[in-house]
Image (spheres, rainbow, N blue to C red):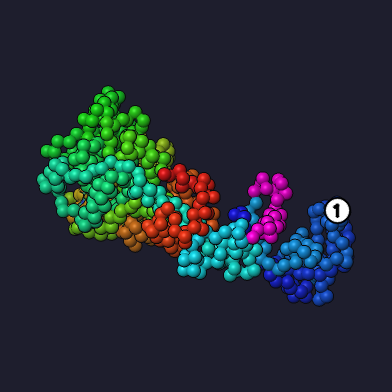
Amino acid sequence: MQYFPFRHVDKTQIITINKITGESEYVQVVGKLTSLEIMGEKRGRRLVATLNDGTGELDLVWFQGVNWMQKFLQVGSKYRVFGKAGFYMNAPQISHPEIEEVTETGIEKNLYLEPVYPGTEKLKARNLGSRQIAKLVYALLQMLHEKDIPENLSSHIISKYKFINRYDAFRQMHFPKDQNEYNDSLRRLKFEELFISQLRLSFVRYKRHSFSKGLLFNKVGNYFNEFYHNNLPFQLTNAQKNVLKEIRKDIGSGKQMNRLLQGDVGSGKTIVALMSMLIAADNGYQSCFMAPTEILAQQHYKSLQSLLKNISITVRMLTGSTSAKEKREILQATANGEVTILTGTHALIEDNVVFKNLGLAIVDEQHRFGVAQRAKLWKKNEINPHVLVMTATPIPRTLALTAYGDLDYSVMDELPPGRKPITTVHRMEYARPQVMDFIKSEIKKGRQAYIIYPLIEESSKLDFENLMKGYEEVKAFFPEPEFFISMVHGRQKAVQKEINMQRFIKNDTQIMVSTTVIEVGVDVPNASVMLVESAEKFGLPQLHQLRGRVGRGNEKSFCILLTKVKLSLEAKQRLKIMCSTNDGFKIAEKDLEIRGPGDIEGTRQSGILNFKLANIIEDKKILEAARWEAEEIIEKDAELSLNENLNLKNFLAIQKDKTPWSKIS
Ligand code: ADP
Ligand code: MG
């Protein structure tokens, strides 16, 4: 029943043969077979039949299955014929039409929108083409009654949204009388699909809030207060304060926190992370703070150390390039509790990293951090530690609701004060000299610049050569000793990257030439120009992240997107969006619109967005409604014990094991 047709062929109209014109596409006629004969030889051999409906004659021709068709058809019988009409020697004809004897039983007698079902090789091998499937479904529907497809939505929802009932919806999905019937079914079944998934997600959250035992961080102590009063370098924004409040509420509830923090680039997530970790420390627990790249881990390590100056907290860093000796020592100090904050890369979630009492795990700049990885973090303590996932760039609300709907989420939609909006422009390659002159003038004012080259594959030789070529060009434009250039790329050892990065941070070098290894997180407030080479090769989130590297200081900043002249439509769209807004939330929505949900990295395999009917972009409104209703039910009647939710309860009891959501909790 849930094997839905992907379209319908309109067979609601029967036309007369004299109305067939040269332009007519698909036609359906009913008439008597007046002749049937095999003509021609060898490759020209064909079966030709003539159909007469009283207004004219139509030739039907078969080049294949000639003998079989000849036996199947009978002169004198009445047939319904459907196919693409053409003209041959001025006479209308259809080759290889669909043909069916018109009898008084079965679906043949009805005029209808014929369902077309997706085929698979397997089905075809069993001779189950679309029409056979249609017949089976039709037969099945004849046997099913309303009680076999019981309603699963409450009468309140049904009447509020004017939905048709479930039984009718299924029937009309397959065999609608007209387009309206089909649309009504589709709308109802899409809602149902999204609603059930939202209900499960809300239930997972509800269960966590009400039952899952979590570590209780109920006090704010010396670490936090010392930092707040002595070390906090600026006033927190209201958004930061609100999020901290939400986090404190979570971790002070005795339940496990599982929160997604969405904030635009530069909104100041790091400090929120740090302050949360200080609360963990005040309650006697360790924290870990994971970054997606080595450079970023380094930067976090450095900034944590400087922010925690004069506060006696041990911060250590563990990455892929930590020496074996140091690693052994860190692992030991982590296991025995000497380390309070452990920062680093994915190395942190490896099995050999054992904590004495991990209380809080923070994953930075990485919303594509899957359920499985989160689960790995949870297991690092007997009672699941609190988990905070911070996104690199905002994610569209539809994705937040579906792919991350089991998490609570906070939004930081405010940038620290004093930021000047970044001016973004798109320039073609031939303008490179002017662009370079502009960068020169900025550097002469004391600013610094990034020049970024695409990195399609970590190891790609071509990308690397491209970068080196670019580096030579940049060097020719900006000769020493007037200018100094840093270069960072994926083939360098971590130490080398770090040295080059540090020179740039200290303003010993004015230009940073790099691949996207610096994409996320890097914070050098004096840099005011971001030049992206071959910008057409970057995705929107990446461009937005890169642009976020500038505009961090008090100076006016610029982002220049340099491209070749000939661009694909999609690339043009992306560049236009980048030039028109700085708002990461808007960009995220546009990105999803352009790419579609099937293309979102990390979600494709998980099947989390694979809805049968619904499409989270097109059906955004339905999704919002489904979310709202699901929340409402969980809030009022999470256990579904009220009478009005009985339908739903019965339905879920049958469906229980069929859903990927069960894996989440
Ligand atoms: P992101 O959210 O992109 O990770 P960061 O945490 O790196 O942002 O912060 C970006 C910059 O803004 C840093 O230089 C940080 O010190 C600064 N910053 C953060 N919060 C504030 C604030 N409330 N007022 C002023 N500057 C802030
Ligand atoms: Mg950050």
Q: What's the residue at 73%, 71% (across, down)?
A: 14
Q: What's the residue at 76%, 69% (across, down)?
A: 29
- Amino acid under label 1? Asn
Residue 456 pos. (x, y %): 42, 43
Q: Which quadrant of the rendered structure holds the N terminus?
A: bottom right
Residue 229 pos. (x, y %): 11, 47
Q: Which residues are magenta?
A: 120-145
Of residues 368 and 108, the one nearer the viewer is: 108
588 is higher (above) or lower (below) than 358 = below
User: Magenta: predominant secondary structure element?
Assistant: helix
The answer to whether residue 445 is left or right of residue 512 is left
- Residue 220 is a magenta residue: no
344 is higher (above) or lower (below) than 648 = above
Q: What's the residue at 33%, 61% (across, down)?
A: 581
The answer to whether residue 462 is left or right of residue 612 is left
Residue 63 pos. (x, y %): 80, 56
Total number of numbered discs in the rendering = 1
Of residues 206 and 530, the one nearer the viewer is: 206
Of residues 279 and 129, the one nearer the viewer is: 279
Q: Which quadrant of the rendered structure holds the C terminus?
A: top left
Label 1 secondary element: helix
**Which picture quadrant has residue 32?**
bottom right
Q: Identify the residue position indicated by label 1 in the image.
A: 67
Q: What's the residue at 32%, 35% (across, down)?
A: 381
Q: Is residue 171 visible?
A: yes
Q: Is residue 416 visible?
A: no
Residue 225 pos. (x, y %): 14, 45
**Which picture quadrant has residue 282?**
top left
356 is higher (above) or lower (below) than 627 = above
**Which picture quadrant has residue 415?**
bottom left
The answer to whether residue 570 is left or right of residue 316 is right
- Residue 142 is a magenta residue: yes
